[in-house]
Every structure is written in C-alpha cells, then in structure tokens.
C-alpha cells in the first residue's frame, strides 16, 4: 500500500526562480524536489502537528 503525503507548497518570487521548475516546501522553504522520503514525512508531520522545529532536509 502506498501512502502519499501532502505538504503545503509556496512559490518563490518569479523574478528570482522559475516557478515551473522549483516548488518550495511550505514548512522549510527548500525545493520539494530535493526532499527525500524522510524529509517529506518530517515536513508533513511538522505541518500536521503545527510544530516549530528545525529542518532535517539535506
């Protein structure tokens, strides 16, 4: 069984980064494409629990 995680996503300013290529995580502001499975779960849990904690993204 596969579980998909849903993270809030923010978009960077268009004048600095091409939005079509880069979506940013709404929790840590890193590119979502650079998240591994653990980072995705961590950010999703942080969002779900409304927690304030440090980033673990690599």
Image (spheres, rainbow, N blue to C red):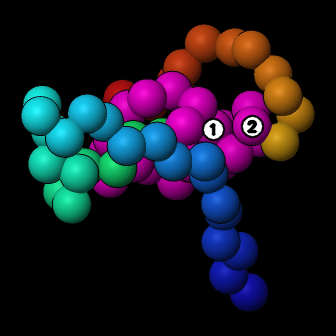
Q: What element carries label 1?
A: helix
Q: Which residue is drawn at 43% across and 29% down?
A: 29
Q: Residue pushed farthest right?
A: 49
Structural distance between the alpha carbons of marks 2 and 1: 6 Å
How crowded pointer 1 is (Cα within 10 Å; few <14, some 14-19, many 20+) is rated as many
Which quadrant, please, contains the C terminus? top left
Residue 3 against residue 58 in the figure, above or below: below
Question: Which residue is under mark 1?
Answer: 43
In magenta segment, residue 48: no
Q: Which residue is drawn at 63% across and 38% down?
A: 43
Question: Which residue is under mark 2?
Answer: 47
Magenta stretch, residue numbers: 26-47
How crowded pointer 2 is (Cα within 10 Å; few <14, some 14-19, many 20+) is rated as some
Q: In this view, does 18 lie to the left or right of 12?
A: left
Residue 49 against residue 34 in the figure, above or below: above
Q: Is residue 38 at all visible to an observer of this figure?
A: no
């Amino acid at each position: 069984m596969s579980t998909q995680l849903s993270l809030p996503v923010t978009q960077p300013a268009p004048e600095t980064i091409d939005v079509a290529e880069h979506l940013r995580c709404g929790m840590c502001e890193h590119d979502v494409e650079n998240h591994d499975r653990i980072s995705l779960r961590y950010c999703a849990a942080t969002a779900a629990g409304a927690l304030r904690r440090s980033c673990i993204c690599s």
